Image: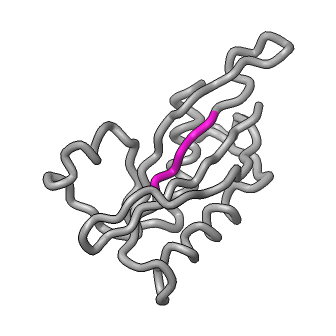
Amino acid sequence: MLKEVGESIKAVLETKFKQVEYYEGQFERFDEQVINPPAVYIDYVSGEGTETEDPFGTMNFILFLMTSKLERNPGNMLEMIETVIGLFQDKGLRDEKRAYLGRGYYEGYRNNTTFPGLIIYEVALKVVR
């Protein structure tokens, strides 16, 4: 189930962004990474069971959005945040067999860091089954 939800999020993001990957410590070796903005890294953050004993009741993700500019068009950070909200806010997620996996909710954003020529924001996303 965890893999399927992540793959569903990735598939939705790939419709709008050039580069979509799972976060696996790339920031620790950032000088070795090739970034093709606008890019998104998906990070599994936490999960909580529900009262009905569903171990996958709520799953929390951080989407690391990366681009080279905050507000100049096209492909700027503010536009990316709005795109993510539009893709996930109160929308159903499905796997490749069209089975329902849960509903997405945008939880907020914050500035993460700036690297030379690249800004990174975190967007919190929650998936509720």
Q: Residue at x 69, y 15 (%)?
A: 55
Q: How many marks?
A: 0
Q: Residue at x 50, y 49 (%)?
A: 10
Q: Is residue 17 above or below residue 90?
A: below
Task: From the viewer's side, name the closer residue of 75 and 102.
Answer: 75
Q: Residue at x 47, y 78 (%)?
A: 70
Q: Is residue 47 above or below residue 81?
A: above
Extreme-right residue of the structure? 52
Q: Is residue 62 above or below residue 14?
A: above
Q: Residue at x 69, y 55 (%)?
A: 88
- 110 with respect to 120 (left or right): right
Residue 101, percent from left and from top? 70, 34
Image quadrant of residue 67? bottom left
Residue 94, percent from left and from top? 67, 42
45 within the magenta span? no
Residue 34, percent from left and from top? 21, 60
Q: Which residues are magenta?
A: 60-64
Residue 4, percent from left and from top? 56, 32
Q: Is residue 87 above or below residue 77?
A: above
Extreme-top residue of the structure? 53
Task: From the viewer's side, name the closer residue of 71 and 95.
Answer: 71
**Quarter in which the N terminus is drawn:** top right
- 94 with respect to 51 (left or right): left
